[in-house]
Image: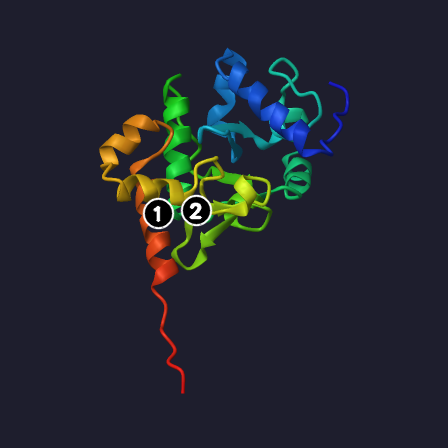
Amino acid sequence: MKTQELVTELDQVIENIKLYQLEMGREKLLDLIAYVRHWYAIQDSEGDWSFAPSKFVGYVGMTGERYDPQTLDGRDTEAVLRTWFCEVQEGSVLEESLRKQLQKATARYGKKLNSIARLHVLRSVVGTGSIKPVLREMQDWRITSDADILGGKPCIRGMRIRVADILDMLAGGASREEILVNFPYLEDADITAALEYAKGAVDHRLIKAA
C-alpha cells in the first residue's frame, strides 16, 4: 500500500466518517472493530451520531478496501485530528451516551468494542469552538449557542430548535410526551436541560439600590 496522505480539512474527515458508516458492514472492517482504540464521532442535524476509527478518518480518500491498520500509523492520524477533535472525558454524561450508541451500532453485527476504546468529538461540542455549552458548571452539553444557528440563541444540541421554543410549548400546555411525539429527534433530557437553563437564567441574586 502506498503512503497515505493525511487529511488537512475537516470536510475530508466528515466524508471519511460518513463513508465508514456506509461500509461498516464489510467483513474486513467488522473483523477489525475489536482492535480500534480511538473512535471519532460527528453529529448530524437530526442529532444522530456517526463513528469511525482514527486510522480510517485521518487519511485522504480512505475506503474499506484500502483500510489496513497494520500499515497505517495511528499516532499520525490522532495528531492531525486533534486540530478539530478532543477526547471526551471518560465517565461523563456525553461519553456514556456516545459509548452506548457506538456499542449498539457494533452489536448489530455481533461485534464488541475494545475495552479501552476512547471517544473523540469535535471541539465545538464540548465548548472550545463555535458551538459551546452554555451550562458549563453543570457539564450540560445539550444547550448550545452558535452564531450561525438562529443568531446564536440557545439551542438544543446544535439543532435549529431553541430553548425558547421548548419553553413556549410547555407554557402553552404541551406535555413532555406531546413534545417528543411532535419532535422525534428530541430526547426527554433535552427538555430537562431547557428547563434547567431557564431556571439558571432567572435564578440570580437581586441587588438593592442604596
Residue 127: x and y in percent read 53, 50
Disc 2 packing (10 Å; few <14; some 14–19; many ≥20): many
How many labels, in total? 2
Residue 114: x and y in percent read 44, 33
Q: Nearer the viewer, residue 27 or 183?
A: 183
State the residue at coordinates (45%, 40%): 157
According to the picture, the residue beneath numbered tag 2 turns out to be 143
Residue 109: x and y in percent read 40, 16
The answer to whether one can see residue 137 in this image is yes
Dots 2, 1 in contact, CB < 8 A: yes
State the residue at coordinates (39%, 78%): 207
Give the CA separation, mark 2 to mark 1.
7 Å
Is residue 148 shown above or below 13? below
According to the picture, the residue beneath numbered tag 1 turns out to be 193
Q: Residue 209 is drawn in which quadrant?
A: bottom left
State the residue at coordinates (32%, 49%): 195
- Please state which amino acid type lies under the numbered disc 2: Ile
Q: Nearer the viewer, residue 44 or 90?
A: 44
Quarter of the figure with the C terminus: bottom left
Q: Nearer the viewer, residue 29 or 173?
A: 173
Q: Is 3 positioned to the left or the right of 202 in the image?
A: right
Numbered badge on residue 154: none
Quarter of the figure with the N terminus: top right
Q: Is 111 positioned to the left or the right of 59 in the image?
A: left
Residue 132: x and y in percent read 52, 49
- Please state which amino acid type lies under the numbered disc 1: Ala
Q: Tag 1, which secondary structure?
A: helix
The answer to whether one can see residue 69 in this image is no
